[in-house]
Each structure stands twice: as C-alpha cells, then as structure tokens.
Amino acid sequence: MNLQSREQGTGNREQRVIAALGFGVLLLVAGCRQDMQNQPKLIPQRGSEIFADHRGARPQVVNTVARGQLHEDSYFYTGVVEGANGYREEMNVMPFPVTMDVLKRGQEQFNIYCTPCHSRVGNGLGMIVDRGYKPAANFHDQVRTAQPISHYFYVMTHGYGGMPDYSAQLTPEDRWAVAAYIRALQLSQSATAADVPSGVQVKELKDIADEKHLPAGFAQPWMLPGTAIQAYPPVAKEGYPAMAPANPADPAITIPKSKPAPAAAQ
C-alpha cells in the first residue's frame, strides 16, 4: 500500500468519527426539548385539570384498608361490642387466653405506667397522690370490682376524668394484658386458701422472706415516704375510712385533720 492510500484511509476514519460525534450531538440536543419537563403529571397537594374535581390527590377507594389495619376483631381493638339496642356495651371477656406470660407483661406495663397514680397494689394512692395529686381510682372498691374487664381497656384507650389516654404508650395487646393484671390484683385481695388448686403449696410471706434472706419488713405493710401512713393494705387519708392496724396488738392508725392555713396579715 502506497502513502496516498494510507492517507486516504486515515481521512475516511476521521470523517466517520466526526459523523458519529455529530450524530450524538444531534441526539443530545433532541433530548433537551421541554416536552418531558412540561408533560402532564400529578404533583402532591396541587390542583389538576385531568379530573373533574380538579384535585391532584385522589380520594381513597371506598372499602379499602391499608395493610395491617384491617382490625377484623372489633372487640379486640375497641373493648366494646354493638348491643341489641344499638348502644356499645362493655364485656367481661378477654379476647385471647390469659397465660402467665400475659400477666407478667401486664404487671410490667402496669408498674411502668399505672403505679405513679394507682400504686403497685392498685389502691389509687400512688406516689404522686402522696404529693398532693387527686386520688386515682381504687381498683379494690365495689364500683371497680363490679366493672367488666373491657372497661379498663376502654379507659386506657380513651382516658377518663383526670386520667389521659394511654393508646400511644400501650398497644392493644398490652392494654388487655394490663386489664388482666388489674383483675388479678383484685382477686388477690379477697383470695383464700380455698382458692388455691389442690396440691399447690401455700407459703406465708414471712417464710418466703426468710428463704430469700430479705429484710423482716418485706412481708409487712410498707410506709409512704415522708408520712406515717401505711400503703398496703389500702391506706387511710383524711376523708377516707381509718385503717385497721396490720397487727391487732398495735394501736389503730389515726389520721389527723388538716390544720387550716393561717390568715394572711392585713
């Protein structure tokens, strides 16, 4: 191959390269048109001319439910059922079996969220009550023991009186577990040896304290900080019935009336 042929081949390659580059530039320029930018599309929270109601966001299709929010068991999620008269009614039924694990979970959540007001024994005289807050419900009085178990679930869900709702802190499962534990607390206050299943050994708290090398006062009524009032059994405060002593040989506990505040100086 002579020199002229080599030069001619080199020139052809350069022309092909230039042509390819030019074609690529044409494609790039063609893709920069505003048609794609200005194409009709829906932008959240903006109007739209596509639909008759001029709303870009479309309403949810009727009778559709998000995943995990079907809530087929209405009683489990609300604590009430539709009665024959059209009113919502509470029931004394748990929506699932109560096992020891359920009661332990209920005790855990009760001690976290409920004891500041209701105390660990549920007598309504928790720590913040001892510091001047309004007494909470006593789970052991006749009114509360007669209430169905779903009542406690409903109150935890919606709140009642001075009590806020705890639906954000407690899942439905935990609310039911706490309700079951409250019922266990109530039963514990009136339980007798006859309620213990046959073959189960019953021990005195004092004996358990000795076995576990706990202080002698472990099995005795404990005192609220800064007061002379016992917190278990249910305590007596001004305006409440006086409490019998834990030991019959001890003198009865008396609750003195509050002294009126001194008059302001004129």
Image (cartoon, rainbow, N blue to C red):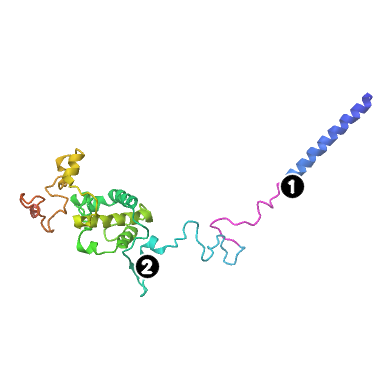
| In the rendered image, the vertical position of residue 238 relative to residue 12, given as above or below | below
Of the image marks 1 and 2, the number of the one nearer the N terminus:
1
Q: Quadrant of residue 55?
A: bottom right
Residue type pointed to by label 2:
Val
Q: Main secondary structure of the magenta part?
A: loop
Determine whether the residue tagged by mark 1 lies in a helix, strand or loop. Answer: helix
The residue range painted magenta reads 30-48
* Residue lying at 57% horizontally and 66% vertically, measured from the top left: 53
Residue 32 in percent (x, y) is at 70, 46
* Contact between labelled residues 2 and 1, with CB atoms less than 8 Å apart: no
Residue 132 sits above or below residue 55 on the image: above
Q: Nearer the viewer, residue 124 or 209?
A: 209
184 horizontally vs 170: left or right: left
Instruction: Residue at the far bottom: name it.
Output: 85
Q: Is residue 53 left or right of residue 4?
A: left
The image quadrant where one finds the N terminus is: top right
Q: Nearer the viewer, residue 264 or 27?
A: 27
Q: Nearer the viewer, residue 187 or 34?
A: 187
Whether residue 89 is visible to the viewer of this picture, yes or no, is yes
Across and down, in percent, residue 79 comes to 35, 62
**Residue 30 has which mark?**
1
- Mark 1 Cα shell of 10 Å, populated few (<14), some (14-19), many (≥20): few
Which residue has dot 2 on it?
81
